[in-house]
Amino acid sequence: MSNKTRGCNYERQLVDLLYSRGFATVRVAGSGARSIPSPDIVACRKGKILAIECKTSRRNQVYISEDQIKNLVGYSQAAGAEALVAVKFRQREWYFVHASEIPRTNGSHLVLSKDTAAQKGLTLEDLELLFK
């Protein structure tokens, strides 16, 4: 299975998880492939909007390009949404980290480790309580 297919499957899984917790959700097909900035998932609940960029990894960290974060933040500002990066590491639950809290590398990428995601991130249960 290709990385792209695996990523799409994880996005669909997250859409289903959020929906089962009372969020109105939609996966944005082709996100990142167009010149118009768009997140991977848009989720709404009780008038609050989440713009979510999804990342998964078998390793201990994920790298996110600065452009992806800029596009996520730009979309979020235009939509009045919260910009979150949802990350799932092997054998771990989903964590949701605010785009502004992801550490930068020396280059043009940001890096999110398992430990940072667990420290700074919200769990699915946290999101559910926060958006009651």
Image (spheres, rainbow, N blue to C red):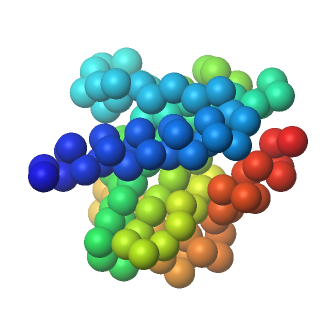
| Residue appearing at x 20%, y 45% in the figure | 4
Quarter occupied by residue 48: top right
Left or right of residue 48, residue 91 in this image: left
Who's the residue at 18% across and 52% down the image? Answer: 3
Percent across and percent down for residue 26 are 51, 26
| Residue situated furthest right in the rendering | 132
Q: Nearer the viewer, residue 77 or 43?
A: 43
- Left or right: where 47 falls relative to 122: right
Residue at the extreme left of the image, as rendered: 1
Q: How many marks?
A: 0
Residue closest to the eye, 45 or 55: 45
- Point 52% across, 40% down: residue: 16
Residue 106 shows up from this direction: no
Q: Quadrant of the C terminus?
A: top right
Residue 112, can we see it? yes
In the rendered image, residue 24, in percent from the top left (x then y), is placed at 65, 27
Horizontal arrangement in the rendering, residue 75 relative to residue 21 (left or right): left
Q: Position of residue 27 (x, y in %)?
A: 45, 29
Quarter of the image where one finds residue 33: top left
Q: Is residue 99 above or below residue 41?
A: below
In front here: 21 or 97? Answer: 21
Residue 40's spot in the image, x, y percent? 43, 35
At a point 50% along the width and 46% down the height, the residue shown is 14
